[in-house]
Amino acid sequence: QSVLTQPPSASGTPGQRVTISCSGSRSNIGTNTVNWYQQFPGTTPKLLIYTNNQRPSGVPDRFSGSKSGTSASLAISGLQSEDEADYFCATWDDSLNGQLFGGGTKLTVL
Amino acid sequence: QVQLQESGPGLVKPSGTLSLTCAVSGGSISSSNWWTWVRQPPGKGLEWIGEIYHSGSTNYKPSLKSRVTISVDKSKNQFSLRLRSVTAADTAVYYCARAPDIVTPHFTNAFDIWGQGTLVTVSS
């Protein structure tokens, strides 16, 4: 069981807006920035969002991130079938002195 | 374009030592990056193992710290992972990754480049 809690699954229809949450505590999300990764089955994770809300070059602006208190969220607007993947949040934890990943959320496009 | 490539045995016996190397190409391991190991058990989520800076400074996941050593070889432009006393629970795809060093406090390093990953199975 991860210290960072994500819903195991999420779903939406094409064109919809979907949000994936990541809940932590003061020692991790409450203090440090959050990154998000996208992983398709059998492939390497890809950096999707860094420093809470920044997109690396090449990531569509349909993807956005936010953070408030001890929680963070990834939003995907204009959902597309190719967005079907696993999504992981990650942040540093000051108590553990290490980086943490959320358990991951499997996004299904209906 | 920096690329990372993991290499090492795909099968390790229980109680043995898992040893992997990550070769860095297209850039210097002495650049301002944290070189990281992440693993993913089959069908499960990602787990941060630890990281090293070219200076030799390391950080390890506390629950693995007693069994893990990450080292850097500047002459070969590579870094390595050693995990001792392995059990079946250590079976996973092991990834190496790069995280540019962010000096600003409270900024979590982001893994912007990943190796393709290598499956290591612990079994007799």
Image: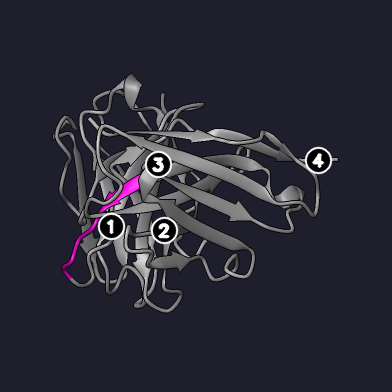
Give the mark, 4 or 3, whose residue is nearer the N terminus: 3
Label 2 or label 1, whichever comes before in sequence order: 2
> Observer-nearest residue: B44 or B98?
B98
Could you tell me which residue is drawn at 67 percent across and 33 percent down? B10
Residue position for label 2: B51
Q: Earlier in the sequence, mark 3 or mark 2?
A: 2
The answer to whether the residue labelled 1 contacts the one labelled 3, judged by CB atoms less than 8 Å apart, is no
Query: Quick check: do tags 2 and 4 share a chain?
Result: yes
Residue under disc 4 on the same chain as residue under disc 3: yes
Q: Is tag 1's residue or tag 3's residue first in the polypeptide sequence? A: 3
Disc 1: host chain: B
Of the numbered discs in the image, which one, if any, rests on residue B1?
A: none
Q: Which chain hosts label 4?
A: B
Q: Quadrant of the N terminus of chain A?
A: bottom right
Look at mark 3 in the image and give the residue it sits on. B76
Q: Earlier in the sequence, mark 1 or mark 4?
A: 1
Q: Amino acid at mark 2?
A: Glu
Question: Is B16 within the magenta?
Answer: no
Q: Is residue B55 left or right of residue B91?
A: left
Q: Amino acid at mark 1?
A: Asn
Pointer 1: what residue? B109
Considering every residue shown, the one lying at the far top of the view is A81
- Mark 4 highlights which residue? B123
